[in-house]
Image (spheres, grey):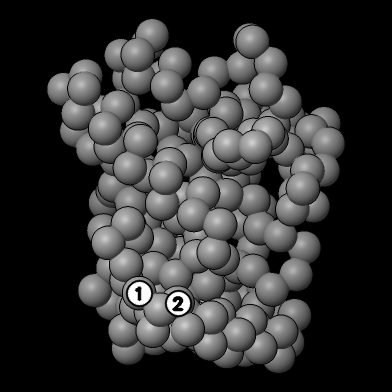
């Protein structure tokens, strides 16, 4: 376990440096290409409900146009919010439209932060109350490998969410969401060190 943690720490450092060195125009162009590959995929085309992420201001694949495209295609869009408190965890809340995001305040990661209002649908309500599955979860990461391995930023938010989301779908007899990794070419490595609790993706699109 200790060796895995050391390898992960060094890999995060290397990928962050590679992302920082990437010119902005190249980052934007590659982001667009990777998102277009995702949009053309069978799993995305079939999806009615999609969980996405909004990119951080620097050093991450841009997703603004992908989110807008989801609204244009009339897909239901869910975006992450890290709930505060001593046992903080990540939830996914529905965004109504692109203007909804513009109204949201900036959260802890300097990205639009969904208000946890009682009237706003989260994934648990989607599955339990509406009996509707979450079809696709687009998963961010610092590094991926071609076997579905994923290295996050070390907080474990997505690993916990993916496990809970799968359990919720199984409980209600629904097909499990397709986990899709989205990345830049500099984030693809030969092998991501994986611990027992780390969650893999099913598909990967990068440019």
The answer, for residue 73, to whether it is visible in the render is: no
109 w.r.t. 77: above or below = below
Residue marked by disc 2: 5
Left/right of residue 19 with respect to residue 139 in the rendered view: right
For residue 1, the mark is: 1
Q: Residue at x 39, y 68 (%)?
A: 150
Q: Where, by quadrant of the figure, is residue 147 drawn?
A: bottom left
Residue 114 position in % (x across, y down): 69, 31
Residue 38's mark?
none
Residue 58 found in image quarter = bottom right
- At x 53% / y 81%, what residue is drawn? 9
Q: Quadrant of residue 2?
A: bottom left
User: Residue 141, relative to residue 67: is it above or below?
Assistant: below
Neighbour class for label 2 at 10 Å: few (<14), some, many (≥20)?
some
The answer to which of 166 and 52 lies nearer the viewer is 166
Where is residue 169 shown, x and y percent of the image?
Answer: 26, 28
Kindly indicate whether the residue at mark 2 contacts the one at mark 1 (C-beta within 8 angstroms): yes
Percent x, y of residue 78 = 53, 34
């Amino acid at each position: 376990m200790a060796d895995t943690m050391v390898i992960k720490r060094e890999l995060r450092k290397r990928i962050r440096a590679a992302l920082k060195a990437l010119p902005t125009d190249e980052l934007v162009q590659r982001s667009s290409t990777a998102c277009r590959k995702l949009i053309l995929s069978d799993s995305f085309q079939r999806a009615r409900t999609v969980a996405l992420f909004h990119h951080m201001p620097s050093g991450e694949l841009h997703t603004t146009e992908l989110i807008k495209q989801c609204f244009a295609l009339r897909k239901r869009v869910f975006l992450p919010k890290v709930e505060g408190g001593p046992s903080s965890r990540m939830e996914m809340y529905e965004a109504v439209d692109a203007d909804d995001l513009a109204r949201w305040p900036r959260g802890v990661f300097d990205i639009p932060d969904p208000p946890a209002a009682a009237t706003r649908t989260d994934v648990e309500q989607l599955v339990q109350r509406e009996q509707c599955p979450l079809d696709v979860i687009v998963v961010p990461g610092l590094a991926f490998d071609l076997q579905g391995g994923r290295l996050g930023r070390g907080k474990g938010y997505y690993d916990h969410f993916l496990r809970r989301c799968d359990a919720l779908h199984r409980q209600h007899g629904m097909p499990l969401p397709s986990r899709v990794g989205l990345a830049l070419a500099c984030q693809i490595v030969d092998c991501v060190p994986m611990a027992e609790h780390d969650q893999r993706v099913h598909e990967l699109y990068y440019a």
